[in-house]
Image: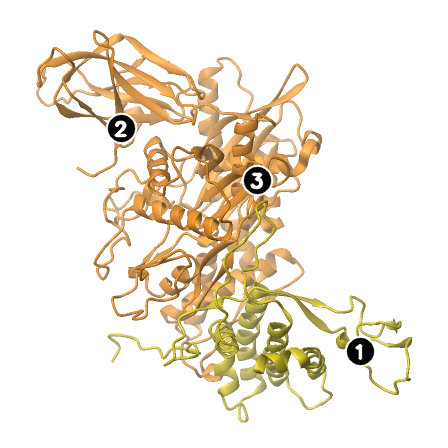
């Protein structure tokens, strides 16, 4: 059910997510900007999961036909929690977002944001192939002819009834070209989702 | 259509490539446990085994598709990451133990020094299980694949001795692969380069070139020299020298940088714990790559989180500067030195901690100088009179660190300085997957005969120790003599019979023999006796079980002759032959400790 809904709105979520990155607020500091971008990426993940094929592992081109039996698809929530666990493990995303940043200095936030940026970037590079929808620069003139990919574009300003549309590229957009996330294992009825981050106990330190 | 496979059974990572009858090979995806909750496909399988505690995974951990029973251990990415903080439960660098002459390579010794693991592993078992993982993964993603051993090539370091090669073959048999072919890693990198250039490669090399294959991986460095000669207008290639096993690589560079930053932080009043240090190593690795790829970048900021959930309060800030990377990595590991500047071997203490024999001098350029000096000494023995300095004029780089152009440039600079002529880099190398790809190319080439082969006989000469027969003189120990049984340069399918020398063997029991080798004695011929074996390097012992031949009683002494041959698969085999009956016994390497 959740998945079906996502599939229908995937394009919209993607566009909203992209627009979130340049939400105009002059008072935003660096740390908050990064955190909002990262939250946006989690949303992007929803969209990507819904719009790509599930099942057989992504196998690079090989001379033999790959025909691994597709494992039974785990529940969508379990996959999403597992992805969040990856962002937490590599990029401490949950730690970062769960902290109260109201009293923190920009310096503190900036240092922590480096950890989040490096780790989340690593996860995105490892498991997704993300490309810009438009290869041009922001500010370039763009012409959208009739039949343009409407789901991959969001038109701002006074939109005439019919294309072609001429305008300025404000944000080139992002699209996930491939997703190679780990296949979630080990969920049970008692624990339908993976643990986000295990509690850590150092032995002998008590 | 036939499929050929090349397996890179690396010290830090494994990879497998497959090739059809034509075209470039592909790297196959390897299914493995990647996190505590999931499995996935990656092009590399880290050569790591993690042995969890009894109750660590009550539900068994993420199951691999081909494993039906509960997993008692993990291999690959999850094993490496999970074990990083549990070194007592992690096996890494098992391959370096496989060629450690003083370790019991069939004995349960790994994880080395661990007191918490109840069932330890032998280096042989690690190779066996890693191979098995690669094969099962290929079978599960490509069920139609047939792994005919005649189509499979496994790579080994050029510096692997015969015992380590034998153990690798044994691991392949245990994994169900049968009799496979071995190929030296630097040669594999060269085959990959040749294949990726098609006929264009002839534009980059010419008659008289001497090519250095400079392969620096995560934990090891391996050098080989390949000479190019023109015969009747056709270029031919010959591997003329291989280096010694060197435990020094990219991981050393990251550790050196991390220690430098950690000391800076300590001076400033911040002490990192063990976990933070590991996070720092990761951070300097990325920082180093950024700085090396962009010389205009003055410094990068590093953020080292603490283990606590409080990221804001616990994260330590540090910086890594361009000059630190230049000083520690470029000048520290690749200093501009003279050709006679040999690596320092530190034996001042007299007592060394047991464990792997890591190189004590980090200067890779000095190890390169030593390699070339030894190769030259060896060549001068075989070709009396020529004295032209042996310095390569072209380099093929392999290994991830050489993605950084300042390091490639420095090696070229040093070689140009030594020869007084500009050296050049062979363009278009793919430092990450070349070994597996080259192995698949070689597997195809062996089968189809199509393509250029690198001529490469045995890189070393081999000897059996003989106790001198002489009168006992008090206070003087008689030297062990050495009989050369296999000279350098023996090619596949060739053999030698040692005539004029007879040995007497006791029958009915296993006899043991000391076994030596040298990579700098091109002059020794089969049958030659050296007065003192101490000029050679001793390897694993050889042993033969001799049942009494027909007509002889157990315990009787029988005369035997020695025969050596290099099989079609490139393995050195040594036999005792009893001439009157024609019976033959193969000598095996004994790598157990006594």
User: In this rendering, does residue B338 appear at all?
Assistant: no
Judging by the rendered image, the residue that carries numbered circle 3 is: B19
Q: Is residue B345 left or right of residue B28?
A: left
Name the subunit of mark 3: B
Judging by the rendered image, the residue that carries numbered circle 2 is: B588
Q: Relative to the observer, which residue lies in front, B14 or B420?
A: B14
The correct choice, above or below, for B199 with respect to A108 in the image is above
Q: Relative to the observer, which residue lies in front, A60 or B537?
A: A60
Please name the color used to draw chain A. yellow
Check disc 3 and report its element: helix, strand or loop. strand
Q: Relative to the observer, which residue lies in front, B233 or B39?
A: B39
> Which mark's residue is nearer the viewer, 3 or 2?
3
Callout 3: 10 Å neighbours few (<14), some, many (20+)?
A: many
The correct choice, above or below, for B585 with respect to B304 in the image is above
Split into 4 quadrants, where in the image is the C terminus of chain B? top left
Q: CA distance from mark 1 to mark 2?
A: 72 Å
Split into 4 quadrants, where in the image is the N terminus of chain B? top right
Marks 3 and 2 in Cβ contact (< 8 Å):
no
Q: x, y (%) of residue A28?
A: 66, 88
């Amino acid at each position: 059910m959740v998945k079906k809904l996502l599939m229908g709105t995937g394009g919209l979520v993607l566009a909203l997510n992209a627009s979130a990155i340049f939400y105009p607020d002059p008072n935003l500091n660096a740390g908050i900007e990064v955190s909002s971008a990262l939250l946006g990426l989690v949303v992007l993940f929803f969209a990507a999961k819904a719009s790509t094929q599930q099942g057989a592992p992504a196998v690079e081109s090989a001379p033999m036909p790959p025909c691994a039996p597709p494992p039974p698809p785990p529940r969508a929530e379990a996959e999403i929690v597992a992805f969040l666990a990856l962002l937490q493990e590599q990029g401490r995303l949950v730690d970062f977002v769960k902290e109260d940043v109201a009293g923190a200095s920009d310096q503190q936030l900036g240092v922590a944001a480096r950890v989040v940026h490096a780790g989340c970037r690593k996860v995105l590079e490892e498991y997704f192939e993300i490309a810009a929808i438009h290869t041009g620069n922001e500010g370039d003139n763009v012409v959208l002819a009739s039949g343009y990919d409407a789901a991959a574009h969001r038109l701002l300003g006074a939109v005439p009834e019919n294309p072609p549309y001429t305008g300025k590229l404000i944000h080139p957009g992002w699209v996930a070209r491939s997703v190679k996330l780990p296949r979630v294992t080990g969920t049970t009825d008692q624990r339908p989702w993976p643990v986000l981050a295990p509690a850590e106990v150092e032995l002998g330190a008590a | 259509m036939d499929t050929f496979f090349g397996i890179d059974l690396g010290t830090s990572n494994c990879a497998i490539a497959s090739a059809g009858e034509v075209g470039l090979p592909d790297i196959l995806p390897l299914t493995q446990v990647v996190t505590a909750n999931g499995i996935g496909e990656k092009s590399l399988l880290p050569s790591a085994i993690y042995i969890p505690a009894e109750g660590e995974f009550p539900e068994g951990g993420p199951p691999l598709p081909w494993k039906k029973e509960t997993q008692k251990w993990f291999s690959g990415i999850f094993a490496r990451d999970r074990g990083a903080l549990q070194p007592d439960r992690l096996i890494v660098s098992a391959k370096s133990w496989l060629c450690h002459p003083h370790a019991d390579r069939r004995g349960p010794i790994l994880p080395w020094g661990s007191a918490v693991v109840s069932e330890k592993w032998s280096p042989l078992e690690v190779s066996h299980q890693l191979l098995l993982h690669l094969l099962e993964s290929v079978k599960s993603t490509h069920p139609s694949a047939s792994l005919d051993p005649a189509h499979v090539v496994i790579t080994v370091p050029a510096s692997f001795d015969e015992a380590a090669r034998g153990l690798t073959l044994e691991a392949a048999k245990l994994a169900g692969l049968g009799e496979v072919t071995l190929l030296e890693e630097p040669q594999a990198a060269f085959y990959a380069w040749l294949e990726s250039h098609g006929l264009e490669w002839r534009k980059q090399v010419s008659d008289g070139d001497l090519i250095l294959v400079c392969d620096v991986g995560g934990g090891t460095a391996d050098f080989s020299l390949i000479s190019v000669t023109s015969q009747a207008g056709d270029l031919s290639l010959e591997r003329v020298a291989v280096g010694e096993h060197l435990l020094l690589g990219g991981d050393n560079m990251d550790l050196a940088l991390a220690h430098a930053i950690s000391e800076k932080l300590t001076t400033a009043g911040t002490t990192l714990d063990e976990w933070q240090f590991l996070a720092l190593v990761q951070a300097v690795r990325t920082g180093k790559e950024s700085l090396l790829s962009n010389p205009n970048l003055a410094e990068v900021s590093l953020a080292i989180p603490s283990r606590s959930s409080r990221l804001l309060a616990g994260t330590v800030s540090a910086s890594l500067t361009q000059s630190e990377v230049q000083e520690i990595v470029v000048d520290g590991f690749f200093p501009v030195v003279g050709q006679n500047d040999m690596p320092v071997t530190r034996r001042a203490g007299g007592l060394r901690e047991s464990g792997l024999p890591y190189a004590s001098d980090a200067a890779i350029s000095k190890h390169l100088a030593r390699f070339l000096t030894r190769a030259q000494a060896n060549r001068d023995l075989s070709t009396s009179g020529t004295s032209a300095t042996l310095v390569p004029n072209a380099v093929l780089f392999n290994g991830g660190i050489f993605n950084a152009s300042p390091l490639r440039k420095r090696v070229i600079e040093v070689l140009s300085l030594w020869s007084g002529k500009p050296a050049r880099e062979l363009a278009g190398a793919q430092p990450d997957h070349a070994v597996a790809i080259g192995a698949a190319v070689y597997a195809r080439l062996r089968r189809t005969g199509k393509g250029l082969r690198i001529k490469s006989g045995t890189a070393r000469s081999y000897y059996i120790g003989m106790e001198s027969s002489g009168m006992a003189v008090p206070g003087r120990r008689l030297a062990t003599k050495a009989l050369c049984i296999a000279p350098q340069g023996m090619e596949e399918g060739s053999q030698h019979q040692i005539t004029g020398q007879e040995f007497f063997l006791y029958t009915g029991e296993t006899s043991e023999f000391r076994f030596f080798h040298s990579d700098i004695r091109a002059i020794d011929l089969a049958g030659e006796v050296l007065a003192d074996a101490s000029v050679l390097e001793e390897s694993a012992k050889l042993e033969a079980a001799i049942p009494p031949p027909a007509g002889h009683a157990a315990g009787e002494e029988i005369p035997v002759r020695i025969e050596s041959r290099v099989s079609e698969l490139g393995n050195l085999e040594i036999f005792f032959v009893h001439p009157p009956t024609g019976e033959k016994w193969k000598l095996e390497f004994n790598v157990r400790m006594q």
